[in-house]
Image (cartoon, helix red, strand yellow):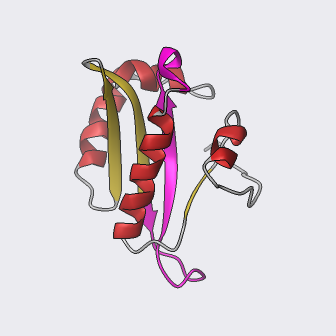
Amino acid sequence: MWPLVADFATSYVPEREVFATSFNDLIARDDTVVLVAEQGGAIGGYLLASIHGTFFANAPVAWVEEVMVEPASRRNGIGAKLMAEAESWARSQGAAYISLATRRAAAFYDALGYEDSAAFFRKLL
C-alpha cells in the first residue's frame, strides 16, 4: 500500500515510518476499515474509512478518508468496488450515511450516486 499512499498525498509528504505505525493502529480499530483491492498479485487500490457518533443524524455516520487506485488501473471498476464495500461496511455498523471530501474525483462520486452536500474546510495545525 505504501507506494499508493505516497502517490495519494498532494498536501503532505507521507513518511514511511509514520505510515507503518498508522497502518497497524488503524487496522486494529473497531471503528475503522482498511480495504485493499488486489489486481494481478499487486495492490491496485485501497480505501480507508471510519465511523463516528453524531448528535444530529440519530445514528453514527461513516467518513471515507482516503480512496486511491493505482493510476494504470483506473476506470476498471476498482474504485467503485472499494466504495461499494465501504458502503456495505457502513450499513453493517448502523451508519445513517457515508460521506467524503474530494478535490479531483467529483464525477466519479456523482456516477456512484453521491451528491454534493457541503463545502470542506480545514485548518493546518
**What residue is at 53 percent from the left and 77 percent from the top?**
54
Picture residue at 43% right of the left edge, 23% below the top: 4
Viewer can see residue 123: no
Q: How many marks?
A: 0
Residue 96 seen from this side: yes
Q: Nearer the viewer, residue 82 or 103?
A: 82
Residue 11 to residue 119: above or below = above
Residue shown at 45%/33% (left/top)? 78
Query: Dividing the image into 4 quarters, which one contains the N terminus?
Result: top left
In this rendering, the answer to whether 49 lies above or below 17 is below
Residue sticking out furthest to the top: 72
Q: Position of residue 121 (x, y in %)?
A: 73, 51
71 left or right of 42 in image: right
Point out the stretch of residues depicted in magenta: 51-75
Could you tell me residue 80's position as x and y percent?
A: 50, 41
| For residue 47, side relative to residue 113 (left or right) | left
Q: Residue 41 at what x, y percent from top left?
A: 24, 18
Whether residue 24 is in magenta: the answer is: no
Quadrant placement of the C terminus:
top right
